[in-house]
Amino acid sequence: MRHTARLSLVVLVAALGGCGWLEDWHGWGSGGGGGGGGGTTNPPAAPTIAITAPADGTSVYGSRTIAVTGTVSGTGIQSVTVALNGGTAAAATVSGTTFTAEVTLADRANTVVASVTASGGSASATAQVTYPFVSLATFQTAGTVIGQADASHGNPNQGTIVAAANTIATPVGAAAFDGTHLFVPDSGNNRVLAFTGIPAADGAQASYAIGQGAFDQVAPSVGARGLNTPQTIRTAGTKLLVLDYMNYRVVIYDPIPGGFDPGSLGAAAAMAVGAKSLDDQGTASCSNDGLAPESMFVVGDKLIVGDSANNRVLIWNSIPVAFLTPPDLVLGQDNAPLRGRRREQPDPGLEHVPHCLARPGGPGPRPDRLRTGRSGVVFGHA
């Protein structure tokens, strides 16, 4: 009876032309008279791979050459590779269930892809990584000019007395990009210009302005909708921070303004560091509520402000959400309550004493170092 069944199966396979789903029929019932000791052979399981570092969405500071590490599993692994931005895949070093490889990040956005090929097939994992810097060469020619018709001109507001969407007067400080808009400090016009995307042509038109209700308005003001000589700009999640220089405060917008506020004087801020309220102009005093900001940086959750007139650097471990929130750390002075009127005109013999700063400006972008300009350097290692 068993021979008859096997003969019938052979005839059926021949009739079906060797259909793939019966290719392993010979494994069924093997063992002859021994009662069929084997079964159908199962295919190998599909491999898996995951990137553990850098995490998806990470911004990398410092060296652009980084290690990519992760985990991998599968039967009969043939290769594990890592590719950057669609380029040639390089072999990774595999040790047990982990792998590592090095990549050199390009400017701005990067896509890291790790792939595995094994007996059971292939798999891949992806991580998006940002290197928020641009490679520049000595005497490199600018590709685009904002605020002027071309690179051969340089007059405030393009030589007119009326500001417009494509003019700038005396920009001071760093611009910021939140992935949608480029925010440029137009200090002389007491506004921040917002451009949709990064302009690709000279003399681009801004989409809207912060600090004014229209492009031809330039008067300085305080309050939730006013600015007075705005300088450095930073973004942090849903927040936009503007160093409001002559109002002695750092203004925080949350959420980031997306356009002019109809019927108002511009987008309203949510908070201000260095002032008692949004209607209050801050002071340069050396008290807990005094601030004379000249530089600003956001590193992770920390807010770092160079308080130039008071010869100190103030650090908040998180961006303040309440008025008059004192800093968590003061660099350049002995203690928080007495921040050193004696240091407003630094003694040349004290400028290099570790606890004294003279006109700090320009905190650096590295999360493990703090750099201040003009009178010296303060730095630390994580």
Image (cartoon, rainbow, N blue to C red):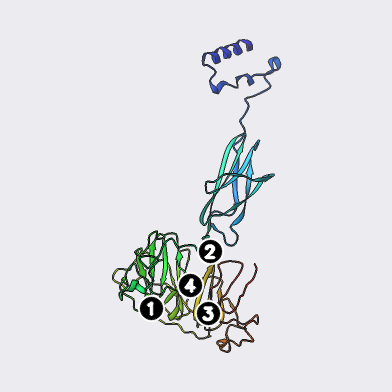
- Decide: is 285 above or below 34: below
The picture places residue 260, in percent across and down from the top left corner, at 33, 67
Q: How many marks?
A: 4
Image quarter of residue 343: bottom right
Q: Residues within 10 Å of mark 3 (few under 14, many from 20)?
A: many
Q: Which residue is mark 2?
A: 138
Q: Which mark is residue 307?
A: 3
Please say if the residues under marks 2 and 3 sit with CB atoms less than 8 Å apart.
no
Image quarter of residue 375: bottom right
Q: Amino acid at mark 3?
A: Asp
- Residue 74 seen in the current view: no
Give the label, 2 or 4, closer to the camera. Answer: 2
Q: Secondary structure at mark 4?
A: loop
Give the label, 3 or 1, closer to the camera. Answer: 3
Please say if the residues under marks 3 and 1 sit with CB atoms less than 8 Å apart.
no
Look at 42% across and 64% down and name the residue there.
182
Q: Which residue is mark 4?
A: 321
Q: Amino acid at mark 4?
A: Val
Give the label, 2 or 3, closer to the camera. Answer: 2
If you read the primary sequence from the N terminus, does the residue marked by circle 1 or circle 2 appear first?
A: 2
Q: Which residue is mark 1?
A: 223
Q: Residues within 10 Å of mark 2 (few under 14, many from 20)?
A: few
Q: Nearer the viewer, residue 365 or 298?
A: 365
If you read the primary sequence from the N terminus, does the residue marked by circle 4 or circle 1 appear first?
A: 1
Q: Nearer the viewer, residue 176 or 225?
A: 176
Left or right of 39? Residue 255 is: left
- Decide: is 251 above or below 61: below
Give the label, 3 or 4, closer to the camera. Answer: 3
Q: CA distance from mark 1 to mark 2?
A: 43 Å
Residue at the bottom extreme, as displayed: 342
Q: Quadrant of the C terminus?
A: bottom right
